[in-house]
Amino acid sequence: MEKIRSAKTIIDKATSGLKEKEALVIRGRFGIDGRGRTLSSIGRDLHLSRERIRQIEKEGLKKVAKYIAEENSALAGDILGEIKTQGIIHKEDIAAKVLESQALAKDEEINSLNLIIKVVPEVQAIEKHDELHESWILNDLSKDEVIKILRDWANYLKKQKSPQKLDILIDAHPNHKVHKISFLSYLPRISKKIVEDYEGSLGLSEWPEVNPRTVRDKIYYVLRKNKKPMHFTDIAKVISEEQFDKKKVVPATVHNELIADARFVLIGRGIYALKEWGYAPGTVKDIIIAVLKQEDGAMDFSDIYKEVLKQRQVRKNTVLINLQNQSEFKKIGSSKYILA
């Protein structure tokens, strides 16, 4: 669909034909000129009861709905079409589809769009909820059914204790197959309890491996996603790009956490890997000792270096210098070494 520059301009026109109190109530309730206000707050200003404000709001919404249907039917149709794609949509996602980028940063634009969608008759709102993000859903679909499906999946994930692909969750609950796959596929985006990881698997939001909150867990997430060792400055950069939350992370903090957590192994200058990948902790000297112990005999330097490179990203000179430690190593011939 073609994006619009300003939803507020549409609402300004829609409310310009309302009675004065109707316009004040509608604009106040939906935050067209600022933050949304309660019935009681508006009632105090107008010296009217909450119930009277509710009645005025109802009448005003009817008129706004009539205006949108008559003057902006194409926009309303496009919005409805976007929601029909999966039957449900996060409020942030529909805003990104409808509004131009400069409008997305303005609360009054987002609030105006929400009012436009509010009066589309085939759609209902999912408001603030402990388990669901604020969304729009078609009238012929049930919010309660959305909650039930997501709870079924969450309970299954708790039993499995590991992230699962969507098709596994659906197959485990045959009764969910009455819904379109497009609808089911979108539900994790609505859920506050279930999140999708970088591999497309679904896990519980309380699990740090899919929804990291601490710096250490964010480091672990980034390394697992990258699937190879990284310099701590690059890890810090990727953490910022991932936008886990609004907390800033600096390289020094990342470095300190890497040093303090046994899950991470220093394998080069500022370069870290996950221990679970098979990297052994310790110094270069410790790695050389382990290599020679495994060989149980003399090894040529080139072979020693090749084995060390599997554990550490170091230069040949670094290995040579360590091999000069006569209390640990003994040179045999021109290039072979054994344990002392």
Image: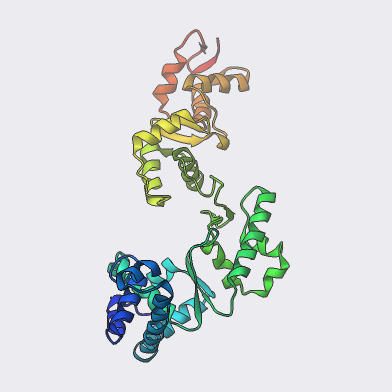
User: Residue at point 30% right, 85% down?
Assistant: 19
| Percent x, y of residue 247 | 37, 45
Residue pictured at 55% horizontal, 58% vertical:
200
**Which x, y percent locates residue 28?**
33, 71
Q: Is residue 98 visible?
A: no
In the rendered structure, the answer to whether residue 247 lies left or right of residue 220 reads: left
Residue at figure coordinates x 44%, y 13% from the top left: 324
Left or right of 309? Residue 153 is: right
Q: What's the image's color scheme?
A: rainbow
User: Height in image: 279 above or below 83?
Assistant: above
Task: Say whether residue 123 is visible.
Answer: yes
Q: Nearer the viewer, residue 151 or 298?
A: 151
In the rendered view of the protein, which quadrant contains the N terminus?
A: bottom left
- Say which of 47 and 70 sits in front: 47
Query: Camera-side residue: 298 or 339?
Result: 339
Task: Say whether residue 264 is left or right of residue 63.
Answer: right
Residue 52 screen position, x and y as percent: 40, 77
Quadrant in the rendering for residue 87? bottom right
Q: Quadrant of the C terminus?
A: top right
The image shows residue 89, relative to residue 221, as above or below, that is below
Picture layout, residue 57 above or below residue 315? below
